[in-house]
Amino acid sequence: MEFFDSHAHYNDEKFDNDRNEVISSVKAEGITRLVSVGYSIESSIFAQKISEDYGFIYHSCGISPNDLPQTEQELWKNIEEIKKIAKQKHSKLVAIGEIGLDYYWNKENADLQRKAFIGQINLANECNLPIIIHTREAVADTIDILKNKQKSINTGIFHCCPLNRELVKEALKLGYYISFAGPITFKNSKNASEIIDMVPLEKILIETDSPYLSPEPNRGKRNDSRNVKFIAQKIADVKQIPLEEIAKITYENASRVFKI
Ligand code: NI
């Protein structure tokens, strides 16, 4: 069985001591494609470097809402840097992201977050790439931007999708993919099954968001892509479809949205 982990951060410092070992074990356990996702200029450059070293790893570049500079002037400079990475036309660059809005960690710079989000959707359109969206406690503004302010031509992915009915309904209407992560396996996420049920098979992706958000039964430990099978299993249980099918469908879906 093969899996596609649609979102991981092997560019994170938590892998500095054993990055090569972990990546080799991941591949050996059947995770034969994954995207290492950027969240800042440095991490985006590093994600590209990792994808050059490993044939099965793809990458994205972008500035997350939690990695923004203080001023708008600096923001546009940073976006220029991301543009430089994107414009290299690196063959394994598959998306712009993660980008979006996070009013849970940062509320006071909401206006700057919206500008960064819109600016980077623009960049994705310019580069003919989909976007990877990070959204937290910002459902209304996220949907408003995607619907009314700046459409993403190649749509994209709601990464670690919040288990929010309204958001998922609107995201699907707009043609986005829903990527499920560790939280769907948590015992206290009561509506996980209901939300999984809402998403048609052809729109589901699976991800680990490594090194964060380890699923049950490894919750609390450092996460890596080997845990993606627990996410797939939860979806298989809810949809009452064999695990192999979920692995195959999510693999095809991820390959389609990333145009691999
Ligand atoms: Ni992430």
Image (cartoon, rainbow, N blue to C red):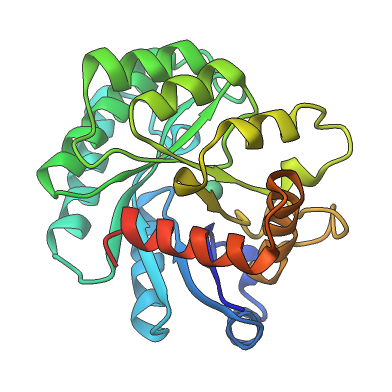
> Measured along the vertical axis of the image, is residue 143 above or below residue 61?
above
- Residue 241 percent across, percent down from the top left: 68, 56
Give the position of the C terminus as an image quadrant: bottom left
- Residue 252 percent across, percent down from the top left: 42, 63
- Answer whether residue 11 is visible to the viewer in this image: no
- Residue 228 image-quadrant placement: bottom right
Residue 37 shown left or right of residue 146 in the figure: right
Residue in the picture at 26% in, 26% down: 118
- Answer whether residue 260 is visible to the viewer in this image: yes
Residue in the picture at 50% in, 17% down: 139
- Residue 53 percent across, percent down from the top left: 39, 85
Residue 93 shown left or right of residue 171 in the figure: left
Give the position of the N terminus as an image quadrant: bottom right
Residue in the picture at 72% in, 50% down: 240
> Measured along the vertical axis of the image, is residue 39 above or below residue 198?
below
Q: Which of 250/88 is in front?
A: 250
- Residue 22 image-quadrant placement: bottom right
The image shows a total of numbered marks equal to 0
> Measured along the vertical axis of the image, is residue 138 above or below residue 68?
above
Q: Which of 40/161 is in front?
A: 161
Residue in the picture at 61% in, 30% down: 162
- Residue 255 percent across, percent down from the top left: 37, 63
